[in-house]
Amino acid sequence: MMAPNYHSLMPHNGQPGHESTRGVLRSTYRRTTGNEPGRFEVTVELIGEQLAPGDLLGMCTGNAIRPAEASTAIEVESLATRLTLRPEPPDLIEGTNRWTIPDLLPLWPATHANDGPVSAWIERGDGTTITLEVVPAELDPAEPPPDRPASTGPTSRPASNLLPRPMTMTSEGTIRTRTAVHIAADPTGRWPAVAALAGRLGVDVATGDTTLNLHVAVDPDLGDGRYDLSIDGATARLVASSPRAATHGMITLAQLVAGGVPERVRISDSPQYDHRGLSVDLARRWFEPAVVERLIDLAAWRRLSHLQLHLTDDEAWRIPVDAFPALAEVGGTRGHGLAIGPLCGSSAAPYGRAYTRHEIARWVAQAEGLAVEVVPEIDIPGHCYAALVAVPELRDPDDTGGVRSVQGFNDNVLIPGPATTRFLQEAFGSLADLFPNSSVLHLGGDEVPPGAWTKSPLAAEYGRRHNVEPGPQMAGYLIADAAQAIADAGRGWAGWQEVAEFSNAIEPSYVVAWTSRAAIGQMLDRGHRVIASPADAYYLDMAVDDRWTTPGHSWAGSTPMAATSDLDLAGYRDTAGSLLGGQAAIWGEHISSLEALDELLLPRLDAVAEALWTGKTAGRANDISNRSHYHPTVLRQASLAAEGTHR
């Protein structure tokens, strides 16, 4: 596969029909005492022109905010974290280029700058827009400097930068810093993919001052997942239990080349857990297809086994479904004047799209060659606002419940009935076709709003036919329909921990315990096969500390490196269920750039990878951070972001 070129995570504004940036929005947040959520003050300033009667301010914020009665603005429209305001009184902004709006109340106290405005625009009476540059929100009074200066990074190079660390390793002799690997024998045919991966991360395994002749053999009797790698002078021998295990051994060899190959090495290695995953949100923010290819590389280089792709949510639908073309055509793009307006950091200009079959096929082929299984996810029956806008027959127009999800979307649930049953069959059938190598399809199942379906005539009719009360239990029927569609496609199914509340005829392949560390034990006690992904340790979109300028969420508390590395999964193993492994997750609300993605992912992803491979990371936060600092993916991070390309 050719090395991917990746671009900015955010497409540029200024597409036809929308004006480029000609103004700026600044904001200040003032904390208050007690249970008060604090207040934002926002100032808009146009450059080279004036505001006019009828102008409206639109913005997306990290934390939903609404004007107080004393504010100089009135809410015109709001949805989730999008807010549109008009001046009060209406002539307040006439003849000026500046508009200050005090007393904007956040839904909950803001903890980081990205809780404030993150995108903004002026809507003009003639239908055009002016995109505003958004300056990160300031804190008033300003935050005091930290007690100690920020770390400047490791002070010494580690003896080995292997990540994750092999189970056992001995080495001796001179370290050779420029080594070329020559294939003497490889029945698996996996080395070209690994060599290409190394090249994309800046590691040259093809040229050097010395040559290492690699002999590969497969021995199924070696033990599940195990490989043995030995190096003696110019000869390397890799014996692996399977082609997948051979791939892991080859990646370890490539990492040795990156850090220097000792004259003699003995490695015996196998993973502690079979499922070692990373989940990435591709719905809330738009990731260029090549950025997903880069994420596959990052996962493979850390010998992760699974990459879960969250492809649909309230904010967007990212995959084609032939029977419902509007899902991609309408649900994939949002912007001012479109069926789905700006959301979650996007601005007025059209933003994002659905991925094409060709782009998805590239991911599938790349992941397969690097021993990574992709787990695609369509999130149902909640988190379906984009799907419901695109395909209105999936909702009940007479539903009077007005139920809001935790993210602020009204009635974002599928309505049970024949139309939805067909939709689930087609959607998950398409998902299976798009990802032919995925043994498990993920159906979501999380965060169905309390009270959903209770005021829906169509849900009441469905309930009478199926002898179920309109309400939360209906989620179980929709999940069962989706599980059946997945089974019809010949795959297993998985869901977030909420699916454990329902009895389904088809047992899930696993459930993902995500709300907390305690949820891991709760799911195991119920007898489930469990993937541990607790938000208070493995959600990498959580900020690493509580400082105002630190990016990320904080609803599960800050998650420093030590919180991630000190999670001991071994204590959860002797229960009624089975702990298959764990999974890091990163959600897209605060991912506005490649730099933000890398800052949140690393080095905590390395701690997760090491924990799931070795089962031993407690107390190793500094050691893992030190090795991560010298890892090729970190060393090339800044230059890659500046160049916008893999080399």
Image (tube, rainbow, N blue to C red):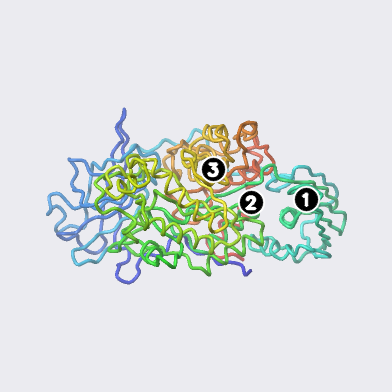
Pinpoint residue 614: horizontal percent, then vertical percent.
69, 41
**Looking at numbered disc 3 in the image, what kind of residue is underneath it?**
Val
The image quadrant of residue 14 is bottom left
Residue that numbered label 3 is attached to = 511
| Quadrant position of the C terminus in the picture | bottom right
- Judged from the image, the secondary structure of the residue bearing numbered disc 1 is strand
Residue that numbered label 1 is attached to = 227
**Looking at numbered disc 2 in the image, what kind of residue is underneath it?**
Ser
Q: Residue at x 85, y 51 (%)?
A: 264
Density class for disc 2 (Cα within 10 Å; few <14, some 14-19, many ≥20) is many
Pinpoint residue 615: horizontal percent, then vertical percent.
67, 38
- Judged from the image, the secondary structure of the residue bearing numbered disc 2 is loop
Pinpoint residue 368: horizontal percent, then vertical percent.
64, 61
Q: Nearer the viewer, residue 406 or 566?
A: 406
Residue 467 left/right relative to 305: left
Q: Nearer the viewer, residue 527 or 64?
A: 527
Density class for disc 1 (Cα within 10 Å; few <14, some 14-19, many ≥20) is many
